[in-house]
Image (spheres, rainbow, N blue to C red):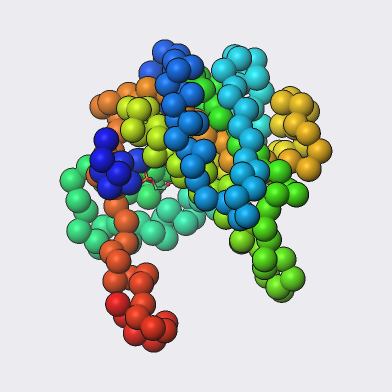
Amino acid sequence: MELYQAMRHTPSCRYFEDRPVDDAVLHRVFDHARFASSGGNRQGWRVVVVTEPSTRSAIAELHFGQWQAHLGEAREGAVRHQGDDSGNKMEHGTESSTRRLDRTDDFAKRLDEVPVLLVVYAMLDTLAITDRELDRPSIVGGGSVYTFVQNLLLACTAEGLGSALTTLLAAEQPQVDELLGAPDGAALAALIAVGHPVAERQYTKLRRNPVEDFVFRDDFGRCW
Ligand SMILES: Cc1cc2nc3c(=O)[nH]c(=O)nc-3n(C[C@H](O)[C@H](O)[C@H](O)COP(=O)(O)O)c2cc1C
């Protein structure tokens, strides 16, 4: 698959077929994703491929607790954004905020049924956290692992697999560490659900803001 094609057609897949993913396919995904950039080329990502049903259930339960805690806030946000959805020209095949929320809710309720859960960790001692002294939450450290995470999502698309990224599980790290036997100094960065997508439930046309909304020329005062 051509790169730009993959970049434009990697939706969050929330409905999966009930069939396993071949290890050889997953291996290809990892083998391409590993060429991601990281600070100092330290490559501090680690991945646990969870397919065992009882571990998937335990992870799904922890994720669901976080999702429920987050749901009220998310619903409020969706109602606020509803105006945007109806005001903008809705392209064929896109979804409204409330519809996305319903799908995300379905996904959280049935996460244990997803054939593969990739739990991505970052080894903290490998991260180049150049903004750690600033008086705001650090954003830079994650940059050394989310490049890899995005590569995983794109590689799944290239293999015809669906994927969905969630970070809610990070709040449950102590319990997940125990389940997976995580080493000291590892930080839970992401959970990626992977499987064969249910074709008729996919939105392949992604909706994103146009370039002019977020790119500036020379300084923030001039639009591109
Ligand atoms: C940091 C991060 C956290 C996310 N968390 C969730 C999540 O908890 N549940 C979920 O279903 N999708 C999650 N997503 C996926 C987004 O909801 C999704 O990218 C967005 O709604 C756009 O959907 P689309 O890519 O299908 O167009 C997350 C994405 C990112 C980058």
Residue 21 image point, x, y percent: 44, 17
Residue 165 appears in the rendering:
no
Residue 78 image point, x, y percent: 43, 53
The residue lying furthest to the bottom in this view is: 221
In the image, residue 154 sits, relative to residue 139, either above or below, namely above
Residue 76 shown left or right of residue 207 in the figure: right
How many marks do you count on the picture? 0
Q: Residue at x 58, y 41 (%)?
A: 190
Q: Residue at x 37, y 22 (%)?
A: 196
In the image, residue 120 sits, relative to residue 79, either above or below, namely above
Residue 64 image point, x, y percent: 60, 33
Q: Residue at x 71, y 38 (%)?
A: 172
User: In the rendered image, which quarter is residue 52 located in?
Assistant: top right
Residue 74 shown left or right of residue 8 in the figure: right
Front residue (pair 144, 69): 144
The residue lying furthest to the right in this view is: 184
Residue 106 shown left or right of residue 199 in the figure: right
Q: Residue at x 71, y 31 (%)?
A: 176
Residue 184 image point, x, y percent: 81, 38
